[in-house]
Every structure is written in C-alpha cells, then in structure tokens.
C-alpha cells in the first residue's frame, strides 16, 4: 500500500520516475505539454520517466510506487523549452500531419503525447496513429492503431484504440509493405476528422533496408512536418534527406531517460495479449465463407491427381497441401522422418522446386486479424483449432459479431494460453 505524502515543490524542473502519481494542491505545474490545474492529477507509469516544470511553488500530494521517485534537475537537462518551440511552430503554421521518427528509446512516444496535449490545449481536434508494432502504446502488439483524443493525457498507454490495422508481427522487418498500407489508411481517415494527426513510428532506423523503409513511409504519408528525435544521432540522416522539401524539426532527447530492457518490452506485450485473451471467447468460422489473406496457405484447391500417392509418401500425416507456383506448402499432423528424401520425391512428382512443411501445432495459437468486407480490421483473434476436413476454424476473439468477418489475415506471432510469445511463423 502506498501512502500519499504532501510536499512543497519549489519552482524549477523535476524528473519523475514511475510509477508515481502527483495531485496538484496549490502549485502551478506544466507537464507533458499541458497545465496541471489545482485539484488535477498527473501520473507516470512504471518503467517510464518524464519531466515536470513547477512554474509556481506550491503544495502537491505524492504517491510513489516501488521504483517511483521525483528529483530536481537542471533546466538544461530537459528539452522542455525546445519542445514547446517546436509545438508552437507546428500549431502556428497549422500543419495537418506530423510524423515523429527516431531510434528506440529516443523519446518519440513522450514527444507525441506532448504535442497532442499541447494541440488540445490550443483547441485543436487531434488524432494519434501508433505505427510501432512491437512497442505500441495503444492497440494490440502487431497492429497499427489510431485514436481520436477527447481530452489531455498523462501517458499514451491510457488510451484505447478507435481503429486497428492488423499486421501480425512485432517487427517491421519483412512487414514494410503492410505497415505502409496500414499507416496510410489510418492517417487518411484521421485527417478527415482532425485538425492535427500525429504519427509515431518504430525505432528501426539503421541499415539500408531500414533507411529505405523509413523514406517510403514518409513518402506515402506526405506529412506537413517531420520531428526527428536526436537520440544518439542514428536518425539524423532523415532530416538531411527531407529538409529541403518538408518542414523538419530536430527535437532533443532528454538527457536522463529510462532505457527499456528487452524483458520489459516482452512483459508489456504479454500483458496486452493476456488482456486480449481475458476478453475473448471461442467463435467458429467456416473457411468456405471467408477469404484467407495468405500468400500460400488455404489458397489453392485440393489436389485430386496423385492424392493417394501423397498419402503414401507422407505416411498419412498430411492435413492439407497448397501449391503456390513452384512451391508446395504442406500442413502435417506429426513430425516426419527423412524430410530431405520426402521433399525430393514430392518435387519430382509435383514438378515443383520447393517444399515447405508446417506442423499443425504451429498454427494453433497464431495471432490473426479479422477483417470486414471493406478489408478494415474489426477484430483480433487467436487460432485455437482447425478442422481441415470440414473446413472449420476456431478463433478466440473479443469480437461478438463473427458474421461480419469476411477475411482473416494470418500473423506471424504464436502465443501460448497465458499470452506468452513462443514462435514466429515464416
């Protein structure tokens, strides 16, 4: 149990380490782009840190968690004044779409929340697009999410998504095209309803492929402004590329920041998965009535020719086979010995170049997106069972109206019943 304690905070800048909750009693407080008025609260979650500026000395009530604390710092250690100048300029110039980029733990989420609050305080309708698949603040891991804000916030994590776009992976690598499509679709919708749309991106910025992906993302979003968080300088090249054609801002990263360890990131995702599972019930989907958005699986008709021979070769263990150009994707019910020998024989009989085996257990627990007839994501689910013979699939999902599902997009994240990530499916 955490006991509230009253303190007098003198004028100046403070760094708060979460979990920590502060009630303003008589001070004048500026926090995350907004004023905390008398009687209002601010909150910094666990494993997070944020700065607060006490503009007028006064009394506050503090509630601190196990690692929570507040300490006074030098004004120059915090980017407050720089961030205010950037936000002022964005609002003054009436920029419609702002994309926030930077390396991991550079302050992208904090700046996004700061700008959203600042815009709300200035009377603008704001929307937030979270395009960080593995470390998203809103939505389910593996999705791009949008939120239309109605009030100021203390953390992006307190928001619940209004719309989702299912990608199905926690990494942008190999999923660049889907991220481009999803970010574009959600930002385009949001721009019709909002004065300002803030798009927060993932921290993958180094290497040729990452650079190409970030450039394409900015090209397709066509923002009015780019905000690049300095971090360790790994994303500065984005400013050099776009500064002649877009308004670009280089935002300093707080000198004192919490670097989130891999286990903390994994824990956050597991919490989101568990929350999804707790809200879910099992629904049955008829594979004859829906489309499966997969390059190979469930995309071809059953083979009539050579079917008995295939049973003999695979020792009656295969459940389904799909031929995709020069590749056969075979779903089996148990492990097969001598895969090389079997593969060579199948290549000869089916006249193909490649054979890919998938065990049925690798499909159970797979994260999937549930799409309506407009190909918009209306739900997220987890495969619990597949009956290939009768063409049925059982999916755990919070979605009530399973009759609205016209398509299923297979993800690459496999979960246990407890919400733990186990395997990524190729």
Image (tube, rainbow, N blue to C red):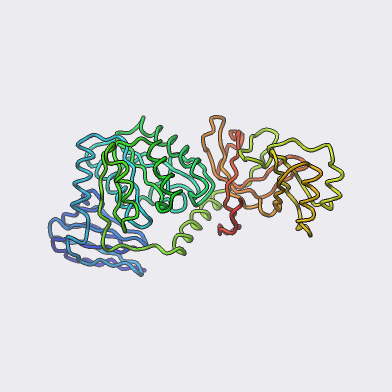
Image location (x, y in percent) of residue 373 = 57, 30
Question: Image height check: is 253 above or below 159?
Answer: below
Residue placed most toward the observer, 64 or 108? 108
Residue placed most toward the observer, 89 or 191? 89
Q: In this view, does 309 lie to the left or right of 286?
A: right
Image location (x, y in percent) of residue 408 = 60, 39
Image location (x, y in percent) of residue 76 = 18, 60
Q: In this view, does 49 lie to the left or right of 280?
A: left
Image location (x, y in percent) of residue 261 = 42, 64
Residue 246 image-quadrant placement:
top left
Q: Residue at x 36, y 29 (%)?
A: 192
Q: In this view, does 215 lie to the left or right of 236?
A: right
Residue placed most toward the observer, 366 or 68? 366
Q: Is residue 206 left or right of residue 122?
A: right
Badge count: 0
Q: Which residue is drawn at 56% across and 33% down?
A: 372
Residue 255 image-quadrant placement:
bottom left
Quadrant of image for the N terminus: bottom left
């Amino acid at each position: 149990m955490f006991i509230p304690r009253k303190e007098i905070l003198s004028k100046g800048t403070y760094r708060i380490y979460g979990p920590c909750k502060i009630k303003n009693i008589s001070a004048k407080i500026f926090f995350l782009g907004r004023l905390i008025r008398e009687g209002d609260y601010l909150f910094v979650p666990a494993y997070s840190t944020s700065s607060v500026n006490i503009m007028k000395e006064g009394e506050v009530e503090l509630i601190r968690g196990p690692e929570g604390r507040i300490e006074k710092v030098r004004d120059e250690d915090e980017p407050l004044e720089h961030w205010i100048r950037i936000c002022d300029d964005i609002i003054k110039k009436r920029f419609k779409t702002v994309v926030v980029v930077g390396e991991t733990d550079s302050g992208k989420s904090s700046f996004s929340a700061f700008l959203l609050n600042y815009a709300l305080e200035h009377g603008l309708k704001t929307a937030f697009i979270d395009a960080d698949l593995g470390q998203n603040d809103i939505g389910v891991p593996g999705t791009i999410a949008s939120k239309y804000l109605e009030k100021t916030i203390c953390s992006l994590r307190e928001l619940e998504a209004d719309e989702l776009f299912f990608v199905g992976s926690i990494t942008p690598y190999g999923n660049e095209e889907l991220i481009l499509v999803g970010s574009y679709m959600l930002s385009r919708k949001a721009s019709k309803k909002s004065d300002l749309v803030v798009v927060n991106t993932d921290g993958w910025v180094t290497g040729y492929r990452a650079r190409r992906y970030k450039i394409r993302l900015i090209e397709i979003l066509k923002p009015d402004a780019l905000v690049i968080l300095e971090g360790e300088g790994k994303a500065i090249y984005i400013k050099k590329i776009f500064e002649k054609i877009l308004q670009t801002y280089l935002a300093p990263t707080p000198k004192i920041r919490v670097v989130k360890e891999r286990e903390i990131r994994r824990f956050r995702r597991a919490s989101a998965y568990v929350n999804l599972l707790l809200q879910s019930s099992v629904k049955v989907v008829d594979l004859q009535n829906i489309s499966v958005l997969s390059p190979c699986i469930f995309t071809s008709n059953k083979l009539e020719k050579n079917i008995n021979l295939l049973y003999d070769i695979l020792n009656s263990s295969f459940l389904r086979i799909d031929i995709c150009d020069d590749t056969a994707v075979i779903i089996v019910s148990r492990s097969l010995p001598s895969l090389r020998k079997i593969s060579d024989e199948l290549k000869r009989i089916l006249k193909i170049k490649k054979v890919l085996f998938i065990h049925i257990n690798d499909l159970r627990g797979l994260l999937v997106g549930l799409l309506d007839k407009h190909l918009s994501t209306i739900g997220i689910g987890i495969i619990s069972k597949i009956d290939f013979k009768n063409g049925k699939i059982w999916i755990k999902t919070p979605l009530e109206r399973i009759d609205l599902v016209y398509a299923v997009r297979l993800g690459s994240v496999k979960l246990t019943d407890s919400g733990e990530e186990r395997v990524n499916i190729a």
